Amino acid sequence: MKRRAFLASLCLILAIGSIILVMRSAAGSTTAQSILSSQGTIAPLTAKYIVQSDGLGGYSTINSLGQTVQYGIDAANLINNAFGNLTVGGEVLLNGNFTVASPIIPSSYSTLYINGTITLANFAPPPIPIIDVDNKTEVNIIGGRIEGNSANQYQDVYYTDIGIYITDGSTYCTVSDVYINDCMPYCMVVGNSWGNSLTAVSDVNVTNCVFNNGRDNCFSIDCSQGSTYPVTNVLVSNCQAMNGSDYGFDVYGTYASNITFSDCIAYSIVADRSDGGGNMSTGFGLEWGCHDITLTNCVTHGQAAGFAVVNGAHDITIINPTIYDLSGYYSNGSHPWPVGILVEPTSYNVEVDGGTISNVQQRAINVKGAGTTVNDVTISDVTFYDGIATGINMEDQGNNSVIQNCLISNCPSYGILIWAVNNTSIYDTVTASCGCGISEAGGADYTFISNSTNSNNGYTQTSWAAHSRLSGNIGWADYPVQQQG
């Protein structure tokens, strides 16, 4: 089927507004009634195959004529047989609760509707994706709940279970309205990893999903372990990641690019890893060379760090974030601090545009990477951690950075601290009720500050490096050019 015709038929299915619940009678015939699935999604008026749980460990496959064509106790086997018998554009509806010990493998050009729960069996042979989309095209997964049952898996095996895995050259796939819970290490992965990829993974859309209690990351876009094939053109929208470890949402690897997160929420991510590695506790992680990533209207709270741009990630745009209530311990090598947004030394070209950061510890924004722009951000109520409470901290490799149109208040240490970096430009920015409004120290030079206002701060910087310049500022002592003393 051509892609346009396939998408048109999918839209028609979603617009129907009803679902078929098929119930077996004693004679094996079927009846139908309109119900809503557990996640509120709409299943097709007619499915090519319906796999029905009897609630007692048995499963039946029913065709579109209402005939039972297979019965057994191996749920994954029945489901995969149904996919194997589909024609292009066919649908499989799972009705009831299923326990699987091997992967469900959708076929290309198919739709899987889940009206119920899929649970990984106790001590299933690892590693196992519960739903494995491997080198497939146009696979749609809609609705239902997936349970990783991680407490009853082999604890000494890191890659025990993944809720949904889209990998190895898969393209034009969608996942919507699915709740994935309690997986080790990840609830969902889109990516090429372990160096065994066939080609790029691209054009994946994940929307209205919940990723709860991923034992490492809740959701990961992963190009790791030697993979040289890209993961690109991925949209993640209106999703939640919560109660997991390390990162809520994570993008990893040089070949991960052109990724968009929109209206996503990450919260209550704890500092712990099932593989015994470093402690992250971060809402959104962008790491190991990933690039051209945009995050819009994303929210994070309830852990140590909000956004971490680390290990060479670059060309990252964070638009209108909401970051609040961060405290605790963020650790990534030499960075043991809680922080709203971190740009580490090897990362560069990061833009933060708009948004608010409030009630965080130590530093709202910590810029250690070059070419960072912070624009139209409101920062307030940074509290002490390890003796520091600063709005924006510029240091290490954070040269050639720009701060403009920001409002920074209630930061007991500094509104902005420029430490040992060059070519920082600050425009039209207000600092208020901070220990010091803006300070240049540690050998920093070539700072340019224009049309910025200090108000009700404890003191104002009065000495500046030889090449630094101040122009048109309000509430400052008149020291346009002074050697730092």
Image (spheres, rainbow, N blue to C red):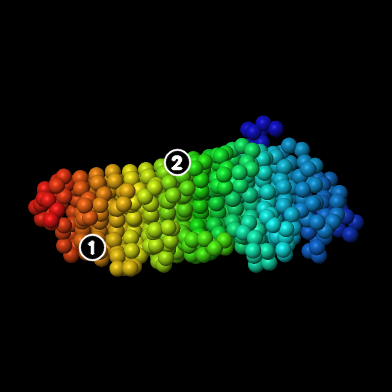
Image coordinates of residue 206 in percent, x first then y, are: 57, 48
Find disc 2 in the rendering and name its residue.
Answer: 292
Q: Quadrant of residue 393?
A: bottom left
**Mark 2 vs 1, N-terminal side:** 2
The residue drawn where x is 64% and y is 43% is 196
Image coordinates of residue 416 in percent, x first then y, are: 25, 56
Res 107 label? none
State the residue in front, 210 or 411.
411
Kind of residue sitting beneath label 1: Cys
Q: Is residue 449 left or right of residue 175?
A: left
Q: In the picture, which quadrant includes the C terminus?
A: bottom left
Query: Tag 1's secondary structure?
Result: loop
Q: Is residue 342 left or right of residue 251?
A: left
Res 434 label? 1
Q: Residues within 10 Å of mark 1 (few under 14, many from 20)?
A: many
* Observer able to see residue 19: no
Kind of residue sitting beneath label 2: Asp
Structural distance between the alpha carbons of marks 2 and 1: 34 Å
The residue drawn where x is 16% and y is 57% is 461
